[in-house]
Structures are given as structure tokens and as C-alpha cells.
Image: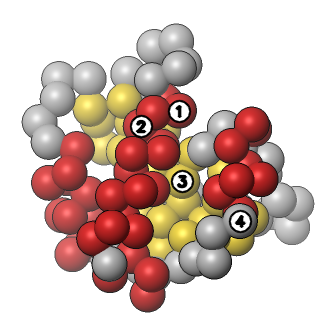
């Protein structure tokens, strides 16, 4: 699967240059990892966001989010954000902030 280069670049700009930041192909797209923990992944024009088990319900309350489901079984702690909604900077900023805040609670890998 391909991923949206424009969206990917917007994420790079927001995350900045951090020594603990890495990019890795996964989930059919390009994932951004902090300290080895995935935060977001661009897949097509959508964004997979790691929100943590406790953050799932709140994340799914937003209209642009739906359960992440690659295997026929939704994964708790992860959501998929629709591509059209990500055109708005405020929406993209929200999801990157949410994902990086959760990743910061995890031990480095």
C-alpha cells in the first residue's frame, strides 16, 4: 500500500528532528516511532493513531475516528482517522499530540 507523501511531510514538520524519532514501514504504510514505540502511521490518506486502551473511548467520540481494524477484529488502544479530516491542521495536531503523549508513557524499546 502507498501512503500520502503530503500528509507524511506534515507529520515530519510537527514532530521535528528528535534523536529518538524513527520512521519504519509497517501496517502497509509509514509509521513514526518515538523511543521505539509507534505513535502514528500513515496508510493511504488515513492515519492510524495509538491512543492507548484508556484513550480509546474518548478517541472514538470524535467524528473522524473509527476503530482500527486490519484483521476483522478491532484493536483496542488504536484508532483510524479518516483522510479528509486530516486536511485541517487542528485535527492533525490533535492526533499527533494525543499519540505522542501516550507514547511518552511507555518504556523505551
Q: Which mark is nearer the camera, 4 or 1?
A: 4
Closer to the camera: disc 4 or disc 3? 4
Q: Which mark is residue 100?
A: 2
- Of the two numbered discs 3 and 1 in the rendering, the one whose residue sits closer to the viewer: 1
Q: CA distance from mark 4 to mark 1?
A: 17 Å
Horizontal relation, residue 35 to residue 81: left or right: left
The residue that mark 3 highlights is 49
User: What's the distance in space between the residues labelled 1 and 2, CA to CA?
Assistant: 5 Å
- Chain-order first, disc 4 or disc 2: 4
Q: CA distance from mark 2 to mark 3?
A: 9 Å
User: First in sequence: mark 2 or mark 3?
Assistant: 3
Q: Secondary structure at mark 2?
A: helix
**In front of the other: 37 or 15:** 15
Residue occupied by mark 1: 102
Whole-angstrom CA distance, mark 3 to mark 1, is 10 Å
- Is residue 76 left or right of 34 when viewed as pictured? right
Residue visible at 38% across and 21% down? Answer: 35
Label 1 with label 2: CB-CB less than 8 Å:
yes
Q: Position of residue 26 (x, y in %)?
A: 49, 52
Badge 4 marks a residue whose secondary structure is loop
Residue at 33% across, 67% down:
90
Amino acid at each position: 500500500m502507498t501512503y500520502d507523501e503530503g500528509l507524511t511531510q506534515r507529520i515530519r514538520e510537527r514532530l521535528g528532528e528528535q534523536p529518538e524519532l524513527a520512521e519504519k514501514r509497517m501496517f502497509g504504510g509509514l509509521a513514526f516511532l518515538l523511543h521505539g514505540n509507534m505513535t502514528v502511521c500513515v496508510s493511504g490518506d488515513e492515519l492510524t493513531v495509538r491512543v492507548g486502551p484508556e484513550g480509546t473511548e474518548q478517541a472514538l467520540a470524535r467524528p473522524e475516528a473509527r476503530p482500527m481494524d486490519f484483521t476483522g477484529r478491532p484493536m483496542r488502544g488504536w484508532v483510524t482517522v479518516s483522510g479528509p479530516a486530516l486536511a485541517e491542521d487542528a485535527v492533525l495536531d490533535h492526533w499527533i499530540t494525543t499519540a505522542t503523549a501516550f507514547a511518552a508513557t511507555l518504556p523505551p524499546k
